[in-house]
Image: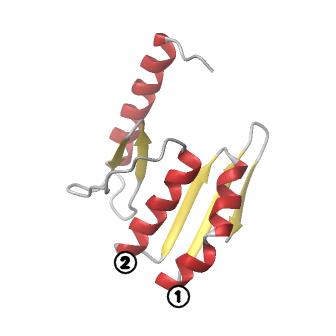
Amino acid sequence: MKISENERDLYEILITSLHESSMMIKNTMIFITSNSEVLSNQTGVTFASCNHKEADTRVIQFVLDSIHRGLKKILVRTGDSDVLIILMGHCQRFVQLQSDLKLYCELHTSSSSKTSDI
């Protein structure tokens, strides 16, 4: 799919606005992907570099990094059902690293939204 310059500009405006809004939320760690960059609402929080091209596989690295940070409750929001399948495939690995992990995937479609306990 070819993305026009206008679409790229709109995407950057939306990501910037979302990131600025997330900065007001202090009790929850939020990560936003913007091309190869990962933005956070927590000052000083950085992610290891990620060379995955597809967001549906990048999310695994984000979950692993969050587990290594000691997080025990993680919500992944996506519009791609492949992400749910990929998370389920890595579930055993996640639980081996954090036995009391609560991992949720919130899947959004054009007509509905559903949260699944993985």
Residue 23 coordinates in the image, percent (x, y): 32, 48
Q: Which SS class for mark 1? A: loop
Of residue 72 and residue 91, the one placed in the foreground of this image is 91
**Circle 2 is placed at which residue position?**
70
Residue 97 coordinates in the image, percent (x, y): 47, 82
The residue sitting at the right extreme is 111
Quadrant where the C terminus lies? bottom right
Total label count? 2
Say which amino acid is labelled 1: Ser
Does the residue at mark 2 contact the one at mark 1 (Cβ under 8 Å)?
Answer: no
Q: Residue at x 36, y 46 (%)?
A: 38
The residue sitting at the left extreme is 44
Task: Give the colour scheme shown.
Answer: secondary structure
What whole-number distance in Å separates the C-alpha atoms at marks 2 and 1? Answer: 11 Å
Q: Can you say whether 11 is above or below 20 in the image?
A: above
Answer few, some or many: residues within 10 Å of disc 1's Cα (few below 14, many 20 plus, some between 14 and 19). few
Of residue 82 and residue 10, the one placed in the foreground of this image is 82
Of residue 111 and residue 38, the one placed in the foreground of this image is 38
Say which amino acid is labelled 2: Gly
Q: Is residue 101 left or right of residue 64?
A: right
Q: Residue at x 48, y 11 (%)?
A: 6
Q: Is residue 72 left or right of residue 48?
A: right
Q: Is residue 4 left or right of residue 25?
A: right
Residue 75 coordinates in the image, percent (x, y): 55, 63
Q: Residue at x 40, y 25 (%)?
A: 13
Of residue 68 and residue 71, the one placed in the foreground of this image is 68
Quadrant of the rendered image containing residue 76:
bottom right
Q: Which residue is drawn at 41% across and 52% down?
A: 31
Q: Can you say whether 42 is above or below 16 in the image?
A: below
Among the two numbered marks 2 and 1 on one chain, the one whose residue lies closer to the N terminus: 2
**Circle 1 is placed at which residue position?**
99
For the question of whether residue 98 can be seen, the reply is no
